[in-house]
Image (cartoon, rainbow, N blue to C red):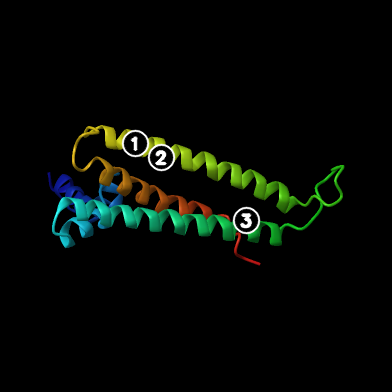
Amino acid sequence: MKKMTIFFLIMMASPAVFSADNRDISEGPEIDSCWRNQQDRGQAATCLHELNDKSNKSLDLLIEKTVKQIKKNNTGPVYKSNDAELTIGDVFSKHFLESQQSWKSYRNDFCLGVGSQIGEDAYDYWPSIYQCQINLNRRHAEEIKMLHADEE
């Protein structure tokens, strides 16, 4: 019994138990802040929409910066290419950009699905979608940074 109690206490003290990973995909600090700091639901939804736009623009800037760094850091020729001007960076950046378009489509569809669980006519349908997109953008930005494309 003592071992079980100690195990339980250790698990409860674990940071993972209280991490943001345990939050619902449509919850986050942005939605909390907008709902807390606005006088009505319409203003709160507008606030979250603006934060979602900011999040999307930030991700787009990171993608743009990453493409430039990929091209800058991969200037070698493509092995057995008929185009002498084609670089590894050109090929890598092309595939990277295509993957980003696919990811954005996934994000949009996924978050529409998340929002649909509360119903399209509910007052917090779009705010749930916006928060979902912000959360996914945040995580995806970390994935992009794992490329270390900004390192020279």
Answer yes or no: do the residues labelled 3 and 1 have beta carbons within 8 Å? no
Q: CA distance from mark 2 to mark 3?
A: 22 Å
| Disc number for residue 67 | 3
* Residue at the disc numbered 2: 108
Frontmost of labels 3 and 1 is 1
**Few, some or many C-alpha atoms within 10 Å of disc 2 (few <14, some 14-19, many ≥20)?**
some
Q: First in sequence, mark 3 or 1: give its number.
A: 3
Q: From the top left corner, tell me how far across and down residue 41 is, in percent.
A: 17, 51
Q: From the top left corner, tell me how far across and down residue 133 is, in percent.
A: 37, 47
- Which quadrant would the C terminus be assigned to in this image? bottom right
Answer yes or no: do the residues labelled 2 and 1 have beta carbons within 8 Å? yes
Left of 33 or right of it: where is 135?
right
Q: CA distance from mark 2 to mark 1?
A: 6 Å
Left of 32 or right of it: where is 69?
right
Callout 2 secondary element: helix
| Relative depth, front residue between 78 and 39 | 39
Q: First in sequence, mark 2 or 3: give its number.
A: 3
Q: From the top left corner, tell me how far across and down residue 71 is, in percent.
A: 69, 57
Callout 1 secondary element: helix
| Relative depth, front residue between 39 and 32 | 39
**Few, some or many C-alpha atoms within 10 Å of disc 1 (few <14, some 14-19, many ≥20)?**
some
Q: CA distance from mark 3 to mark 1?
A: 28 Å
Left of 150 or right of it: where is 16?
left
* Residue at the disc numbered 1: 112
Callout 3 secondary element: helix
